[in-house]
């Protein structure tokens, strides 16, 4: 955990000046510096580290699942600010913890690239292909290799419907004179565990932000001294 040292050669003169000013000037400067580091981490450094380690399909992901707990009060020794992912009770934050430390996650379905907007793996699954929007679905899965069964199921659900063929879920696009056009949407990987290596991206973001701490203190101290 990065610590603000107010007695280094670079800042000790500013610390001395602040301590000779009004009683609250020094602790307020420390508090604002700590909070500036936390917000810099959440708004800049952590999103950058996230983007470096993962495919970011939704640019608002980091902001949606992170918060800042600001430093409070006037006791310098008790001050601390925190930036990071919150316990939202959702699987995403659990996955992020495993991405940070390493572990394994279970997946039931994996979206095919063609299920995503523009057929791009870097984009979100398009609305019409999201699981919650799937409407007409063949009542039974068709074993892979049973082409006649697939054709029968496709005609049963019609265009826009879905058929599970083997371990793959297909969306039926057209039915013309016996020819079927279908798009693979999801692969069923129920029970499959995916091992994750530790990325340490949150810890790295903390180190990078911590390196800016002295700079924030110097900036805030100079502002307060000039106001005197």
Image: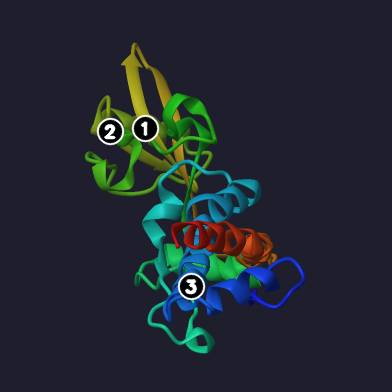
What is the spatial separation of the Cα atoms under label 1 and label 3, in whole angstroms? 46 Å
What is the spatial separation of the Cα atoms under label 3 and label 2, in whole angstroms? 48 Å
Q: Which comes before the other along the chain, label 1 or label 3?
A: 3
Q: Which residue is mark 2?
A: 161
Viewer-nearest residue: 101 or 214:
214
Tag 3–tag 2 contact (CB < 8 Å): no
Look at the numbered disc 2 and give the secondary structure of its residue.
Answer: loop
Question: Residue 183 got which mark?
Answer: none
Image-based side of 27 in relation to 49, left or right = left
Residue at 33% in and 12% down: 176
Residue 226, position in %: x, y? 50, 57
Tag 1–tag 2 contact (CB < 8 Å): yes
Q: Residue furthest right?
A: 9
Viewer-nearest residue: 32 or 65:
32
Q: Which comes before the other along the chain, label 3 or label 2?
A: 3
Q: Is residue 203 visible?
A: yes
Residue 5, position in %: x, y? 67, 77
Image-based side of 118 in relation to 218, left or right = left
Badge 1, how many Cα within 10 Å: few under 14, some, many 20+? many
Residue at 45% in and 42% down: 59
Q: Which residue is mark 1?
A: 171
Q: Which residue is mark 3?
A: 82
């Amino acid at each position: 955990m990065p610590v603000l040292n107010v007695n280094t050669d670079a800042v000790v003169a500013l610390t001395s000046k602040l301590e000779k000013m009004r009683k609250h000037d020094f602790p307020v400067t420390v508090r604002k510096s700590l909070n500036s580091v936390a917000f810099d981490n959440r708004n800049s450094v952590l999103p950058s580290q996230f983007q470096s380690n993962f495919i970011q399909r939704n640019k608002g992901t980091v902001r949606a699942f992170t918060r800042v707990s600001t430093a409070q009060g006037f006791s310098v020794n008790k001050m601390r600010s925190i930036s990071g992912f919150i316990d939202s009770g959702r699987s995403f934050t659990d996955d992020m913890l495993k991405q940070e430390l390493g572990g394994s996650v279970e997946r039931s379905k994996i979206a095919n690239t063609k299920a995503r907007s523009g057929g791009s793996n870097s984009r979100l699954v398009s609305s019409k292909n999201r699981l919650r929007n799937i409407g007409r679905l063949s009542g039974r899965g068709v074993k892979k290799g049973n082409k006649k069964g697939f054709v029968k199921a496709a005609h049963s659900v019609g265009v826009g419907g879905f058929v599970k063929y083997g371990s793959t879920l297909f969306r039926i696009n057209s039915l013309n004179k016996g020819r079927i056009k279908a798009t693979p949407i999801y692969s069923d990987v129920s029970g499959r565990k995916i091992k994750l290596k530790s990325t340490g991206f949150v810890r790295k973001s903390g180190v990078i932000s911590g390196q800016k701490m002295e700079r924030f203190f110097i900036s805030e101290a100079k502002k307060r001294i000039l106001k005197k």
